[in-house]
Structure formats: C-alpha cells, structure tokens
Image (cartoon, helix red, strand yellow):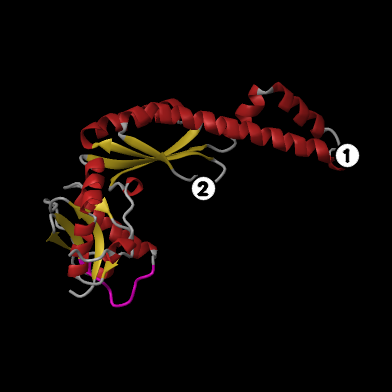
C-alpha cells in the first residue's frame, strides 16, 4: 500500500471480532510496527468528505477494535503516505504514545447528556422565587408598551436564575458520577435546555457500577431531566492524535 488510512494505535492486535470494512469499504488490517499495532486500510484515491456515512465507518472500526484491546483513536482523515512514514512516526513519538496508552489502559469512554424537560426549569424558578412571580404577574396586567424596561429586567433575572440552576444541576450529576471514573471532561452543550454534556473515562470492571449510578440518577430525576447515556466507545475525548505527527523526521 502506498497510502494508509489510520484508525487507531494500540500496543497489541485486537482479538475477537474481525475488524471488518473501513472507510470506502476497504479492508482493515492490524500492522505491527515498531512495538505498536496500527489499524489501517488502503487510503481512498480521493479524500472522502467527513459525511455521516464515512465518519460512522471510521468510528465502527474503532469500536470493534476497542472492545478487544486498549486503543488510541486517531482523527478521521489521517493518512500516512506510506508504511515507512507511519513506522517513523510511531518510533519518533514512542514515549508519548506509550504514555497515552497507559493513561487509557483498561478503560472505556461513557458519555452522558442531561436536558431539562419542557418548561421544567421555568416552572421551578417561578415556584421558588416569589419576587420574580410578583414581577411577572404585574407585567401581565399592563400594556407591553408601558413595561419595556421592566420586561427586559425580568428576562435578565430569569436568565440568571436559569444559569444558576444549570450550574447546580450539572454539579450534582458530576458529583454523583465523577468519583466512579478515572477522569471526566465537560463537553459543549448544544441548546438552552441542556444541563450537562460530559464524557467519563471508566475502568471496564467499573462499567456496571457506573451504569447503576446513571440509572439511579434517571430514577431520581427522570421527571424533570431527560438523560441520554452512550457507550462504551473508544476514548475519543481523552486522546488527541493529530495528523502532523506523520511529519516526524527519520532517525539517524
């Protein structure tokens, strides 16, 4: 092969299920190079766009492999110009790669999103804060043209209360789950209803315990929060391998 599409790097070949097809339907192989195993396929002649179909094909290879061995996922679109270039890259960054593998050894990534159900947070805020209720009720009885400034003030105070409640709810969820994980990281939320989006690095033997903790949160908070729990997946949010590594110089 003259060009290799790179999916991930591990310390040993993943056993169990076959690696299957990768991006563009190419067969995936596990190449032993310089003390590592690189999961690769023949690179497509034309760089594929990062469409959902191609991204899912890349991710599916990683998920199959990560179920059987520790793995450092590599970003979509990383291509080594030749096997020799990839081998030089692995040798040049051996210490960093071994350190990264050590950091995720025996672990999987689990992800959780939590969002308020419709209007829950506004009902809770109005029920809890008498001054906001009183201001809202007064404004409802007066023409909008006469109350512009007061309505702006009401909106500002409600938004501040929403942000405070979001921080409080997110902290409570993190406090329940963070002690069960090796590491965790806060990820970006996508809309105003989202309370939390977080990734957790969890040891495989602790996964059932973590599942039970998430189930307990759902049982306790399910009427006000909708949870979306995903995983296990490779540790995408705890490893970052970049394409410029392939530019490592040859040794000696």
Side of 154 where 34 appears, left or right: left
Residue 219 occupies quadrant: top left
Q: Which residue is mark 2?
A: 190
Residue drawn at point x = 64 percent, y = 22 percent: 128
Tell me the quarter of the picture where residue 57 sits: bottom left
Q: Considering the image in quadrants, where does the N terminus appear?
A: bottom left
Identify the residue position indicated by label 1 in the image: 146
Dot 2: few (<14), some (14–19), or many (≥20) neighbours within 10 Å? few
Disc 2 secondary structure class? loop
Real-space CA distance between mark 1 and mark 2, rounded to the nearest whole angstrom = 35 Å
**Residue located at (70% from left, 33% from top):** 157
Q: Is residue 156 above or below residue 221?
A: below
From the top left corner, tell me how far across and down residue 100 is, in percent: 26, 46
Range shown magenta = 41-49
Q: Is residue 131 magenta?
A: no
Judged by its main secondary structure, the magenta piece is loop
Q: Quadrant of the C terminus?
A: bottom left
Viewer-side residue, 183 vs 23: 183
Q: Nearer the viewer, mark 1 or mark 2?
A: 2
Which residue is situated farthest in the right direction here? 146
Any part of residue 94 in sight: yes
On the image, the x and y values in percent for residue 72 come to: 25, 51
């Amino acid at each position: 092969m003259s060009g290799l599409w790179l999916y991930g790097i591990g310390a040993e070949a993943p056993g169990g299920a076959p690696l299957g097809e990768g991006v563009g339907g190419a067969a995936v192989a596990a190449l032993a190079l310089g003390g590592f195993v690189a999961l690769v396929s023949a690179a497509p002649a034309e760089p594929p766009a990062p469409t959902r179909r191609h991204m899912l094909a890349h991710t599916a290879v990683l998920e199959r492999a990560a179920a059987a061995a520790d793995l450092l996922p590599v970003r979509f679109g990383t291509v080594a110009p030749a096997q020799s270039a990839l081998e030089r890259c692995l040798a040049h960054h051996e210490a960093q790669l071994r350190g990264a593998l050590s950091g995720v050894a025996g672990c999987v990534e689990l992800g959780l999103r939590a969002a308020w159900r419709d209007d829950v947070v506004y009902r809770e805020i109005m029920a809890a804060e008498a001054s906001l209720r009183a201001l809202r009720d007064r404004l409802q009885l007066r023409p909008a043209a006469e109350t512009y400034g007061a309505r702006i003030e009401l909106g500002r105070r409600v938004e501040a209360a929403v942000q405070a409640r979001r921080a409080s709810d997110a902290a409570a969820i993190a406090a329940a789950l963070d002690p069960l994980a090796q590491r965790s990281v806060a990820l970006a939320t996508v809309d105003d209803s989202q309370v939390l989006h977080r990734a957790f690095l969890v040891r495989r033997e602790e996964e059932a315990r973590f599942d039970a903790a998430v189930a307990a949160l759902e049982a306790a908070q399910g009427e006000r929060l909708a949870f979306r729990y995903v995983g296990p997946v490779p540790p995408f949010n705890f490893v970052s391998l970049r394409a410029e590594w392939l530019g490592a110089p040859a040794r000696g």
